[in-house]
Image (cartoon, rainbow, N blue to C red):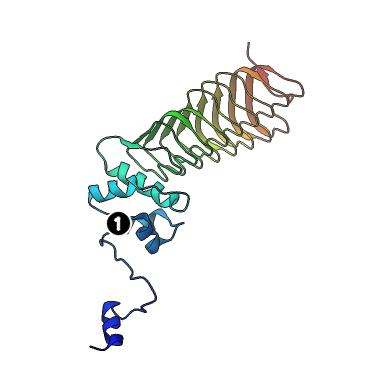
Amino acid sequence: MKLVRFMDAAYQGKASGRKLKTRPGDMIFSLEDLADQVGVKPTRAEVEQFVPQDKNQLDMLISLDSGKRYSLLWGYLTSLAAERSTVPLLLPCRDYAGLELMQGTIIMQEAGAHVGERMKGGKILVRGSAGDYLGQEMEGGGIVALGCRDYAFRNMRGGYGVVRGDGGKFTGLGNSGGRIVVQGSCDERAGWLMRSGSLYVRGDAGDYLGLLMSGGKITVRGKAARRAGWRKKGGSIMAASFGPEAADDVLEMD
């Protein structure tokens, strides 16, 4: 057989300079294999077409180090694995765990950034602290973490989030639904641009609490620092006491 015909047969009529496309149901042995099919920034639906049905194979993919390049792929795989599992899924500390989770339970000792992003159902328990963007754009389900960094529950539309310790800056930024509870204190600009939903802080809140908010409810059992409710257009803010330059319509608890 001539070399040209041999190569054509080997590549099934495709150009030899390109990788063979894997069909849904074929074996995916690495995150790189998956990225060859769907890219590194796919939708969940695109990833689902190539997710292994075999549990051991899926567990193997989740156990691989995703790095930054394949973090979205790894995140989708963790959600799909949790949804199929009859027991809680234990995961290492990485970014995007539980990406678009719909059901099931994920448990982590520590968590990276973007954990529970765009989740619609299920539960995520972080026994330690989480990174930035915890529960960003979540629509349902629940997240409980010991602590978190900045932008927790940003653009939240539903579900609930509980921070058992302190939260960082910008907690609940742009919320349009859902419930947030911070059992410690939170840093500056919590509830910024909030449109609806609720934020409860058992400790103190930093500067600019409820900045530019137009709806929703913020309750702080401790002190709200300077400029709480600044340029507020709607909603309610209540705290035990307020710092200087608070808006006229904030309420002090009895």
Left or right of 22: which side holds 206?
right
The quadrant of the rendering that contains the C terminus is top right
Q: From the top left corner, tell me how far across and down residue 117 is, in percent.
A: 47, 43
Residue 248 picture quarter: top right
Question: Badge 1 is on which residue?
Answer: 29
Callout 1: SS: loop
- Residue extending furthest toward the top: 254
Vertical comparison of 236 with 39: above or below: above
Q: Nearer the viewer, residue 159 or 15?
A: 15
Q: Nearer the viewer, residue 124 or 230?
A: 124
Disc 1 marks which amino acid?
A: Phe
- Residue extending furthest toward the right: 245
Left or right of 55: which side holds 186?
right
Q: From the top left corner, tell me how far across and down residue 253 is, in percent.
A: 63, 14
Count of numbered circles on the image: 1
- Residue extending furthest toward the bottom: 2
Residue 115 picture quarter: top left
Residue ID at (58%, 28%): 217
Vertical comparison of 179 with 63: above or below: above
Left or right of 76: which side holds 147?
right
Residue ID at (37%, 56%): 47
The quadrant of the rendering that contains the N terminus is bottom left
Q: From the top left corner, tell me how far across and down residue 113 is, in percent.
A: 50, 40
Residue ID at (73%, 33%): 231
Judge the density around disc 1: few (<14), some (14-19), many (≥20) Cα neighbours within 10 Å: few
